[in-house]
Image (cartoon, grey):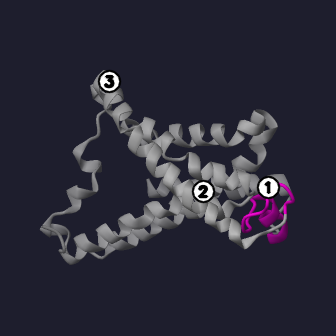
Amino acid sequence: MVVGMVWQFVVSVVILRRELGGLHWPAVKERIWFNGPRDPSTGDPRRKLWWWVVPAILANAAGGLLATQLDVLWTDLLPALSEPAYTRIDSLADPQFEGQWWILGLALTSNLFNYLLGEELLFRGVLLPRMAGVFGRWDWVANTVLFGLYHVHKIWFWPSMIASSFGASWAARRHRSFLMGVVVHGVEGFFIVLVLAIILGWYP
């Protein structure tokens, strides 16, 4: 999975280089909306718009929670798609992983390429700014659905994966800010605390 997300970074860089004729930071920065939130009406940057990440995060949480029953229905209809035990983080709660600091390094690398340089860069930095040309005002919805379906490695979570991702695309699109998407999506990175607890043996 980590290698796949690193590959997303490579693909994003190749696309940007071909599209922009190079990788000059000012051009890349403008292309991927690498800036703080902008007023939807005027386009002016406004710091107080950062507060919009709060309802976006809450919308993701509510959407994911409400869609859990759809996950159950989805896997009941197709039992072969049920979640394997080895994919759950609680499978790491085993004495053999205490002191295994390489796991933390892997988790940090995963976070970097998941919430910034991999998934976010490709979906909210490279794709979203161009999707209005095809989907118009519903570009953020299409981006969310595409982002959810891409998670075929978590196919048992497809319904809740999609429902819990609208906030990131909406915030990034409304305020033309890649960084807002990073913040909204990045709150999931709390799992790093669980990884640290497992390495230190802080679990029942």
Which residue is pictured at 75% across the width and 59% down the height?
32
Which residue is pictured at 77% across the width and 45% down the height?
130
157 with respect to 200 (left or right): right
User: Residue 154: x and y, percent?
Assistant: 40, 42
Residue type, label 1 = Pro
User: Toward the viewer: 113 or 36?
Assistant: 36
**Crowding at label 2, few (<14), some or many (≥20) Cα neighbours within 10 Å?**
many
Magenta stretch in the rendered image? 25-43
Per the rendering, the mark at residue 40 is 1
56 with respect to 75 (left or right): right
Residue type, label 3 = Leu
Q: Is residue 29 magenta?
A: yes
Residue type, label 2 = Glu
177 with respect to 202 (left or right): right
Distance (Cα) linking label 3 and label 2? 30 Å
User: Toward the viewer: 45 or 127?
Assistant: 45
The residue indicated by pointer 2 is 120
Earlier residue among tags 1 and 3: 1
The residue indicated by pointer 3 is 78
Which quadrant of the structure image shows residue 10?
Answer: bottom right
User: Residue 159: x and y, percent?
Assistant: 44, 35
User: Toward the viewer: 2 or 88?
Assistant: 88
Which residue is pictured at 33% across the width and 27% down the height?
73
130 with respect to 75 (left or right): right
Give above or below for 76 relative to 31.
Answer: above
Query: Please, what is the dominant secondary structure of the magenta stretch?
Result: loop
User: Residue 123: x and y, percent?
Assistant: 63, 50
